[in-house]
């Protein structure tokens, strides 16, 4: 009996294996394998789609950048085209206008220098000097003409010189005036002035007040500046050199607004 049961069990097992390998069981396994493969393919396709989307976004950004660059190039070409429309004759005319304006300013400054020289002709060379530099007219007034040592109060003789200068300046348009105070390198410290900066600035301001308040020069056209000891014209090693460095300079400059307007056209 025991052997019979064993035989039947083996028989059922063999039949089951046969059904699995040859019947519906095999189809089920094949279907599951296909499903697994499809899932893998789907994941791969999603990855490829994401990659395509990234590439598309990059291409869109590059397109936008190229459009912006193209717009900039077109604008530059437009400007260049407008600039190139200026004929050789136009350029020659513009150059001549510039040359005429520069020459006119030179003539004005030369005339101004001559007028100041005539107005101050009675003063000695060691009291003042008049010269041109970089298109400007300089009137350099020595300390001995204007101030006592360590003082910012202008002496009567200095006031007379400034009055004569103001008469010329009041009759000259389109110039600006800069007053620069200068000292030697000998330190100064008084109750009124802490150092040479203080003294040079105070002296320049005194000159400005005399030219404007006392003699009617336009305060909108004048500036006071203190340079202290830092712009010497002579060596401070000698008495004569230090005396030359103690000076006040009146610097007259042409108004360049019209020239700049022409250059900007």
Image (cartoon, rainbow, N blue to C red):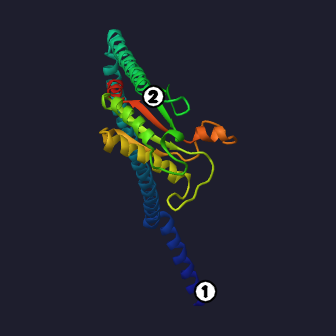
Q: Is residue 191 above or below residue 45?
A: below
Residue 97, labelled with which disc?
A: none
Q: Position of residue 262 (x, y in %)?
A: 33, 24
In the rendered image, the quadrant that contains the N terminus is bottom right
Front position in the image: 85 or 7: 85
Q: Is residue 93 above or below residue 128?
A: above
Image quadrant assignment for residue 190: bottom right
Front position in the image: 264 or 251: 251
**Secondary structure of residue under mark 1:** helix
Q: Is residue 160 above or below residue 91?
A: below
The mark closer to the camera, 2 or 1, is 2
Q: Is residue 146 above or below residue 262?
A: below
Q: Position of residue 117 (x, y in %)?
A: 44, 24
**Residue underneath mark 1:** 3
- Measuring 41% from the left and 55% from the top, which residue is drawn there? 46
Q: Position of residue 176 (x, y in %)?
A: 37, 34
- Measuring 51% from the left and 65% from the top, which residue is drawn there? 21
The residue most toward the right is 237
Going from the N terminus, do you reach mark 2 or mark 1 first?
A: 1
- Measuring 35% from the left and 31% from the top, which residue is drawn there? 169
**Secondary structure of residue under mark 2:** strand
Badge 2: how crowded within 10 Å, few (<14), some, or many (20+)? Answer: some
The residue most toward the top is 89
Image quadrant assignment for residue 28: bottom left
Badge 1: how crowded within 10 Å, few (<14), some, or many (20+)? Answer: few
Q: Position of residue 55 (x, y in %)?
A: 42, 45
Image quadrant assignment for residue 92: top left
Report whether residue 69 is seen.
Answer: no
**Residue underneath mark 2:** 136
Report whether residue 86 is seen.
Answer: yes
In this picture, residue 236 sits left or right of residue 207: right
Q: In whole angstroms, how far apart are the C-alphas of marks 2 and 1?
A: 135 Å
């Amino acid at each position: 009996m025991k052997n019979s049961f064993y035989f039947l069990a083996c028989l059922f097992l063999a039949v089951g294996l046969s059904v699995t390998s040859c019947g519906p069981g095999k189809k089920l396994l094949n279907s599951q394998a296909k499903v697994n493969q499809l899932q893998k393919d789907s994941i791969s396709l999603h990855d490829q789609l994401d990659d395509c989307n990234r590439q598309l976004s990059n291409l869109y950004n590059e397109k936008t950048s190229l459009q912006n660059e193209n717009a900039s190039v077109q604008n530059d070409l437009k400007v260049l085209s407008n600039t190139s429309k200026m004929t050789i004759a136009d350029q020659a005319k513009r150059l001549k206008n510039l040359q005429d304006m520069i020459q006119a300013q030179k003539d004005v400054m030369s005339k101004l220098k001559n007028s100041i020289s005539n107005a101050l002709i009675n003063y000695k060379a060691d009291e003042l000097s008049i010269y041109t530099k970089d298109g400007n007219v300089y009137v350099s007034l020595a300390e001995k003409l204007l101030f006592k040592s360590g003082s910012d109060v202008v002496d009567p003789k200095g006031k007379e010189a400034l009055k004569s200068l103001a008469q010329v300046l009041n009759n000259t348009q389109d110039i600006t005036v800069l007053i620069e105070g200068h000292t030697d390198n000998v330190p100064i410290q008084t109750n009124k002035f802490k150092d040479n900066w203080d003294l040079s600035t105070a002296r320049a301001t005194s000159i400005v007040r005399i030219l404007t308040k006392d003699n009617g020069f336009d305060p909108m056209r004048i500036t006071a500046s203190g340079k202290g000891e830092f712009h010497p014209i002579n060596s401070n090693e000698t008495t004569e050199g230090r005396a030359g460095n103690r000076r006040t300079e009146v610097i007259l400059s042409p108004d360049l607004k019209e020239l700049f307007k022409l250059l900007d056209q």
